[in-house]
Amino acid sequence: MDQLNAALESAPKEEDIQSQIQKSEYSPEYVEQVASDALDFASDLVNDPIVHKIMAMMIVTRMAQWHTLIGDEQLKRDSQESAVCWYRDAGKFQSMMDSLLTIAIGNNDFTVTEDE
């Protein structure tokens, strides 16, 4: 137990590790591994594909919101052409959400209505 306590005391702090990682060091492989780890973690907590569908829906929603916010900023800067592009892409994410809502993935899928 003393060894464990000594190891914990000498281990680098999480914030120190995170501050050492610069955004420029986020290689495609690193980002993909982080995403994969998050998916694996969710699967460990919820042993059902519904957790991945919910994650996909949350991600698509965030991306649509982000694209809308950027479109709003572009409009404020009188860049209507750019705003239209951002809004169009937000609509594409909304279309993805519409598709996800029509795909049933099992008995635990509470996102699809009975009518579908």
Image (cartoon, rainbow, N blue to C red):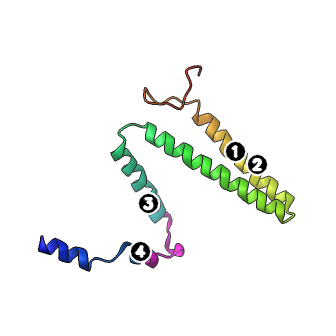
Does dot 3 land on a helix, a strand or a loop? Answer: helix
Q: Earlier in the sequence, mark 1 or mark 4?
A: 4
Q: Earlier in the sequence, mark 1 or mark 3?
A: 3
Q: Which mark is residue 15?
A: 4
Residue at 39% of width from left, 75% of height from top? 17
Where is residue 40? Give x, y as percent: 37, 50
Q: Of the residues shown, which amino acid type is indicated by label 4?
A: Glu
**Which residue is under mark 1?**
92
Q: Of the residues shown, which amino acid type is indicated by label 1?
A: Lys
Residue at 35% of width from left, 39% of height from top? 47
Contact, mark 2 vs mark 1 (Cβ under 8 Å): yes
Residue at 60% of width from left, 47% of height from top? 60
Does dot 1 land on a helix, a strand or a loop? Answer: helix
Q: Main secondary structure of the magenta part?
A: helix
Give the class, few, some or many, for how many residues have Cα within 10 Å of label 3's Cα (few <14, many ≥20). Answer: few
Q: Earlier in the sequence, mark 3 or mark 4?
A: 4
Residue 40 against residue 100 in the figure, above or below = below
**Which residue is under mark 3?**
34
**Which residue is under mark 2?**
88
47 relative to 98 in the view: left or right: left
Q: CA distance from mark 1 to mark 4?
A: 37 Å
Q: Of the residues shown, which amino acid type is indicated by label 2?
A: Arg
